[in-house]
Amino acid sequence: MRRMVIMGLLVVFLAVLLVPTLRGYLNQRSEIDTLNRQVTEQQSTVKTLQKQRDRWNDPDYVAQQARSRLGFAKPGEKAYIIVDDQGAKREVDTNSGVQKDTSGAKRPWYGHLWGSVISAGEAQDK
């Protein structure tokens, strides 16, 4: 009986010693796995950004972006401005890039809200 009690106390003593150590080890392994996943995601983001930076170093790409985004044209080229179906040129605020709404300046707030919903539905992809 005495040996059983001593063996039981020894097992409890080892369990008390090993359980916190094992728990700490497992928590650290989980944290390492999470950090490795984050590193992998960040490396893929860095690669994507490096590819984008390399594209911007290409003069042809910069010229194409200046044409499409800013409406620039090279000397001697003709730039065309497309107007809407009513023939009215729509002005764009240079600071925000948002179309100025001069058609409903005297509408109530809910009219402006509904007008923005309608115009958002009519927007075309660039």
Image (cartoon, rainbow, N blue to C red):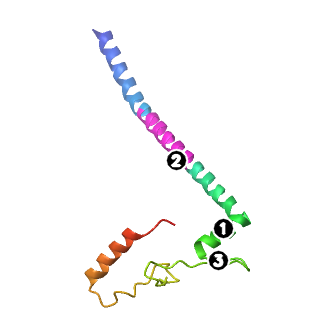
Q: Is residue 81 above or below residue 9?
A: below
Tell me the residue that label 1 is attached to.
Answer: 64
> Which quadrant holds residue 108?
bottom left
> Which quadrant holds residue 104?
bottom left
Which secondary structure lies at badge 3?
loop
Looking at the picture, which amino acid does disc 1 mark? Gln
Looking at the picture, which amino acid does disc 3 mark? Phe
* Residue sitting nearer the eye, 117 or 34: 117
Q: Main secondary structure of the magenta part?
A: helix
Going 30% across and 91% down the picture, which residue do you hit? 106
Residue 117 x, y percent position in the rendering: 33, 72
Going 67% across and 77% down the picture, which residue do you hit? 73
Going 33% across and 20% down the picture, which residue do you hit? 9
Q: Earlier in the sequence, mark 1 or mark 3?
A: 1
Q: Is residue 2 above or below residue 103?
A: above
Residue range (magenta): 23-41
Q: Nearer the viewer, mark 1 or mark 2?
A: 1
- Structural crowding at the residue carrying mark 2, measured as other residues with C-alpha within 10 Å and reported as few (<14), some (14–19) or many (≥20): few
* Residue sitting nearer the eye, 29 or 96: 96
Q: Earlier in the sequence, mark 2 or mark 3?
A: 2
Q: Is residue 32 magenta?
A: yes
Q: Quadrant of the N terminus?
A: top left
Q: Is residue 60 above or below residue 48?
A: below
Q: Is residue 83 magenta?
A: no
Tell me the residue that label 3 is attached to.
Answer: 72
Tell me the residue that label 2 is attached to.
Answer: 38
